[in-house]
Image: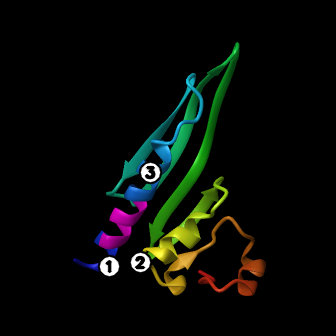
């Protein structure tokens, strides 16, 4: 299996895992997988009392063979989970961090 296929499978698996966690009986988690453009998201959507609840929990893209983490609203950090699955840090970009601060991490700059 090639690297990109593995990365896609890892991302989908992790997002599905988060989606199955209990959030709130009035709010559900939805996964959005665009394998053609390599965009992957986990969003929550629903109602709390009379207020609409919607937000992006996780957003990952695959750009030029690297996994870009655009949004991470998890406590553990999806980058760490990807590393645990065997993705090298050089193939993970913390896109949610400003470019000038990425140099202080062990992850790819771009």
- Mark 2, residue position: 65
Residue 54: in magenta span: no
Could you tell me which secondary element the residue under label 1 belongs to? helix
Q: In front: 38, or 71?
A: 71
**Which circle marks residue 17 in the picture?**
3
- Mark 1, residue position: 3
* Residue 65 lies in quadrant: bottom left
Q: Main secondary structure of the magenta part?
A: helix
x and y, in percent, of residue 17 in the image: 44, 51
Residue 7 lies, with reference to residue 18, above or below; the image says below
Q: CA distance from mark 2 to mark 3?
A: 23 Å
Q: Are marks 2 and 3 in contact (CB under 8 Å)?
A: no
Q: In front: 63, or 32?
A: 32
Q: Residue furthest front?
A: 22
What is the crowding at mark 2: few (fewer than 14 residues within 10 Å), some, or many (at least 20)? few
Query: In terms of sequence position, does the residue under pointer 2 or pointer 3 come before the other?
Result: 3
Residue 9: in magenta span: yes
Q: CA distance from mark 2 to mark 1?
A: 8 Å
* Residue 98 lies in quadrant: bottom right
**Span colored in magenta:** 6-11
Q: CA distance from mark 3 to mark 1?
A: 21 Å
């Amino acid at each position: 299996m090639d690297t990109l296929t593995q990365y896609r499978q890892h991302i989908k698996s992790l997002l599905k895992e988060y989606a199955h966690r209990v959030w709130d009986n009035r709010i559900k988690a939805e996964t959005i997988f665009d394998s053609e453009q390599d965009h992957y998201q986990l969003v929550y959507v629903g109602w709390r009392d009379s207020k609409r609840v919607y937000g992006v929990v996780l957003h990952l893209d695959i750009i030029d063979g690297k996994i870009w983490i655009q949004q991470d609203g998890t406590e553990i950090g999806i980058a760490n989970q990807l590393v645990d699955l065997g993705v090298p840090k050089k193939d993970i970009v913390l896109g949610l961090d400003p470019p000038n601060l990425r140099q202080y991490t062990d992850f790819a700059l771009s």
